[in-house]
Image: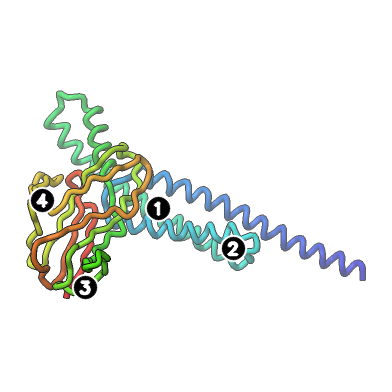
Amino acid sequence: MAEDNDLAMKQKQQQIDSVKTDRASLQSDFDAASAKIDQLTTQNAKMDSALQGDKEAMSKLRNQISAVLHNDKATKEELKQAREMINTLNDKSKQYEARIAELEKENTVLTGQNKTLAKERDSTATQNAAIKKVGSVLTCSNIRMEPIHLRKNGKEKETTKAKKVDVLRIMFDIDENRIAESGTKQIYLRIIAEDGNTMTSPANGSGMLNTMKGDQMSFSLVKSVPLTQGQPLKNVMADWKQDGDYAKGAYTIEIYSEGYKVGSGSVTLR
């Protein structure tokens, strides 16, 4: 009887040791994958919708894996699932890295053209300045528009009825950027009605902006935002007010920074 108990305890201890070993191996692989992703996302701040989608997918996977690894009661099956998620994470990391390589190749072509036109200048300084400028372009996410009705008592109520809209409220987040220097940044907002025309008003500070392609286009609002290097900025808000009623239909918001389009959103009024 004592021998059976000893054997059972020995088997149980072996199972515990096996789970600990699996957990330690998973943690090591997860840390390596996370470090690689952090390096990629820190070094690259170029605008690309596919990159943004991959970044969000990897972030979600990392959170799921971390939750399992921080669960002391995680089962062997849950650890197995974590291993599969780590493999998926590594695959996405490779795809992310490949896309960055493509963007860097495109940037190299542009840099080469600039060097031909200005080969008497200090090429190293020129390249560094160009890379810093591209890398410092801000990216926006969680972009939304809220049509607001202002009641007589001063309270606000969200509405989709065009005739009741008094204010179009634009809200968005500015993502973390470790290259852009701290300071006040100018964010340009274009509100485009269903007929394709940009809504402008001198009272709202509308004007013209220069795009990175050298074109000029009208903007509806300009928003000054205080940015801290390496830190995101949540729930940036800007209100558009106009005289008269809003027309029914879809309204699109486009956000520009440093001449680059960095995000868009829409709302429909009925």
Q: Secondary structure at mark 3?
A: loop
> Which percent across, then down, holds residue 261?
20, 52
Please identify, in this view, whether the residue under mark 2 or under mark 3 is nearer the observer.
3
Residue drawn at x 7%, y 61% as measured from the top left = 197
Q: Which mark is residue 206?
A: 4
Between the C-alphas of marks 2 and 1, the distance is 23 Å
Q: Secondary structure at mark 1?
A: helix
Q: Which mark is residue 105?
A: none
Q: Is residue 31 above or below residue 54?
A: above
Q: Which mark is residue 79?
A: 2
Say if mark 2 contacts mark 3, CB within 8 Å.
no
Q: Which mark is residue 94?
A: 1
Classed neighbour count for the residue bearing mark 3: other residues with Cα under 10 Å, few (<14), some (14–19), many (≥20): some
Q: Which mark is residue 160?
A: 3
Between the C-alphas of marks 1 and 3, the distance is 43 Å
Between the C-alphas of marks 4 and 3, the distance is 25 Å
Q: Amino acid at mark 1?
A: Lys
N-terminal of the two: label 4 or label 3?
A: 3
Q: Amino acid at mark 4?
A: Ser
Residue drawn at x 57%, y 50% as measured from the top left = 28
N-terminal of the two: label 4 or label 1?
A: 1
Between the C-alphas of marks 2 and 3, the distance is 47 Å
> Which percent across, then down, holds residue 237?
26, 55
Classed neighbour count for the residue bearing mark 4: other residues with Cα under 10 Å, few (<14), some (14–19), many (≥20): some
Q: Nearer the viewer, residue 25 or 54?
A: 54
